[in-house]
Amino acid sequence: MKNNMIIHYDEEDDILEIRIGKPTESYFNDLGDDIFERIDKKNGKIKGLTILNFKKRTEKSKSINISLPLKIKLTS
């Protein structure tokens, strides 16, 4: 199965969203510090990440730290 990664930045709300594959019914898991992972309700796989206050973060620093393990399997 081929999955696409979709990266979307909402400048008005300052939210970066990374989605993997087709949209599915999901829930969010709070990773802390305004970072959330999207989890597929049926199979428990990670479907994406949402980072709030993205531009504000990058103005202060050139990197964003996300605690690991965070497993995202990308296949083509």
Image: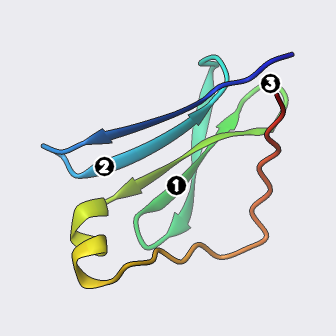
- The residue tagged 3 is 42
- How far apart are the alpha carbons under marks 1 and 3? 18 Å
User: From the viewer's perspective, is the residue at label 1 or at label 3 nearer?
Assistant: 1
Residue type at the position of mark 3: Lys
Residue 14, numbered label: none
Q: Measured from the top left, where is residue 52 in percent x and y?
A: 33, 57
Q: Secondary structure at mark 1?
A: strand
| 63 vs 31, nearest the viewer | 63
Residue 15, numbered label: 2
- Tell me the quarter of the picture where residue 11 sits: top left
Residue 53 seen anywhere in this rendered image of the structure: no
Q: Secondary structure at mark 3?
A: loop
Q: Measured from the top left, where is residue 74 in percent x and y?
A: 79, 40
Q: Secondary structure at mark 2?
A: strand
Residue type at the position of mark 2: Ile
- How far apart are the alpha carbons under marks 2 and 1? 11 Å
- How far apart are the alpha carbons under marks 3 and 2? 26 Å
Location of residue 56 with respect to 42 vertically, above or below:
below
Q: Earlier in the sequence, mark 2 or mark 1?
A: 2
- Looking at the image, which residue is at 31% across and 42% down? 9
Q: Residues within 10 Å of mark 3 (few under 14, many from 20)?
A: few
- The residue tagged 1 is 36
